Amino acid sequence: MDNLGTIGTTEEQIELMDVATNFCRDKSPVDKVRALIDDDLGYDPAIWREIGELGWLAIAIPEAHDGVGLSMAEVVPIAEQMGRNLMSNPFGSTTLAAQALLAGGSETQQAAWLPKIAAGAAATLALREDNGDWDLSNIDASGVESGGTVILSGKKQLVLWADSAELIIASVKIDGAVRFALIERSSLAEGALRRETVIDETARSYEVTLDGVTLSADALFDAGRTRETLEKVELAAGLLHAAEMTGGAQSVIDYTLEYLKTR
């Protein structure tokens, strides 16, 4: 439960809300949102770089890994304003990948990836499969570990922003136990990503084929921290999505009131 924050409004949250309100409003006008729906990438890479420079991806990462050292509670104002302005980019998926690393990654894994994420590298999680089960431990993707290497197989679905992610953290079963594997995007075979059609046209979602991906055993999370990692991801994801929907709902209210005043 650590690093998920507590109820209440802090000075940092108020400050971040002010900055995020102006940034998201100015950088994500409705005409730009509509234009990006037909864009292959789905977001503006220049704005993504600005988000990295603002330090928003570093907020809930410890200072020891070049982060700001705050909690997920301080990420909420940003997610809320992104939802309010339909600003799509890998912010949510990257934030959740960092939380997964903090919950289950080794010190070496955290040291290798958290500073990169804090500096603006995109990342994502690959947890869902075609069974559609809410139980994230019900998976078929697997890995075979031998001689210090792991060979993966299977498919993951609804992997957000996989084409932009430098790191994909995937759940697989090894010897019957759910494990998390750190997969560099560059290690995927050509054609491993297939664009999916989803209801949210502002997002980009992919099916990821893991067949033949070979990793060092050092790329696996500790087997003893799988449950903790899943719980952390579910809590953090619920918080982020609630914030986005709150922002979206507020935007609907604003549009409705404006319409009623001008009709």
Image (cartoon, rainbow, N blue to C red):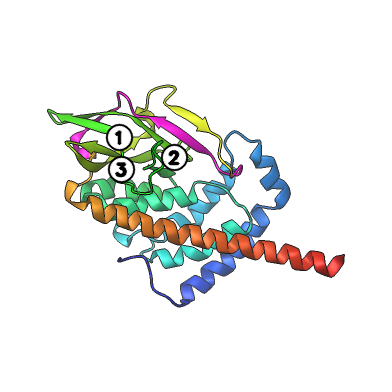
In the rendering, at what x and y percent does residue 251 appear?
Answer: 66, 62
Q: Quadrant of the C terminus?
A: bottom right
Lower position in the chain sequence, tag 3 or tag 2: 3
Res 165 quadrant in image? top left
**Magenta segment:** 200-218
Which disc number belongs to residue 159? 2
Using the numbered discs, state the Cα–Cα distance from disc 1 to disc 3 in whole angstroms. 7 Å
Rendered residue at 27%/38% (across/down): 172
Q: Is residue 117 left or right of residue 203?
A: left
Question: Depth check: 236 or 185 in front?
Answer: 236
The residue positioned 59% from the left and 33% from the top of the image is 40
Q: What label sits on residue 138 in the rendered view?
A: 3
- State whether residue 118 appears in this view: no
Report helix, strand or loop for mark 2.
strand
Residue 143 lies, in percent from the top left, at 23, 32
Decide: is 75 above or below 118: below
